[in-house]
Image (spheres, helix red, strand yellow):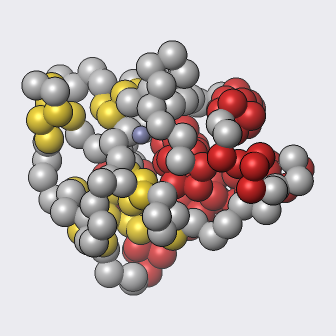
Amino acid sequence: MKRYTPLYEARRYKGNNPDMSDRKMNKETYALRKEVMQYVYRAKKLLKKKGYDMPRVNVRITDVNTAEFIRKDEKVYPLGQARQSDIAIWIPASTISSGYSLHGIVFHEILHAVFGIAHKNSDPLMKPTVSPDEHHNPSKVDKLFINNIKMGDLVWKDI
Ligand SMILES: [Zn+2]
């Protein structure tokens, strides 16, 4: 049983992401993408209230190429990945039906992709692993998201 699932990023890759394959855009993929996009729009709206116009996020719905990765001698399974250079996030279709908080995962990946915020073990939203029972309180997730941006140095410099 996997007790922890990491939110794992792919920023080190310059070209295609070797960990994930993008799904073809069809009716099913659009429906999955729409579920992810609702949180992208939510983030954009939250930031707009703070006076920041969030740039477009490239959202890809994917299949995971390798079921498990070994990282630091630990078996891990990616729920999402992000890359800052082209503001891209990859969300596996399997994540969307996993029961893990999609709100938490998408907001975590946006913090990587848009703001370049790294993992922090002390932060509930930016720690590298998450369990299925976390981040199901929408207003708490929103607050953690905003708090991370206040702590980062990238965003407010860019305004
Ligand atoms: Zn991450």
Residue shown at 16%/27% (left/top)?
72
Please provide percent x and percent y for residue 66: 12, 52
The image shows residue 123, relative to residue 141, as above or below, that is above
Residue shown at 32%/81% (left/top)?
24
Residue 23 in which image quadrant: bottom left
Q: Foreground: 39 or 108? A: 108
Q: Foreground: 77 or 25? A: 77
Q: Foreground: 100 or 88? A: 88
Give the image quadrant in which the ligand numbered 1 is located: top left
- In this rendering, the count of numbered labels is 0
Residue 107 in which image quadrant: top right
Residue shown at 67%/39% (left/top)?
153
Task: Quarter of the image for the N terminus: give it.
Answer: top left
Let me know if residue 102 appears in the view.
Answer: no
The image shows residue 21, relative to residue 4, as above or below, that is below
Residue shown at 14%/42% (left/top)?
68
The image shows residue 25, relative to residue 130, as above or below, that is below
Task: Quarter of the image for the C terminus: give it.
Answer: bottom right
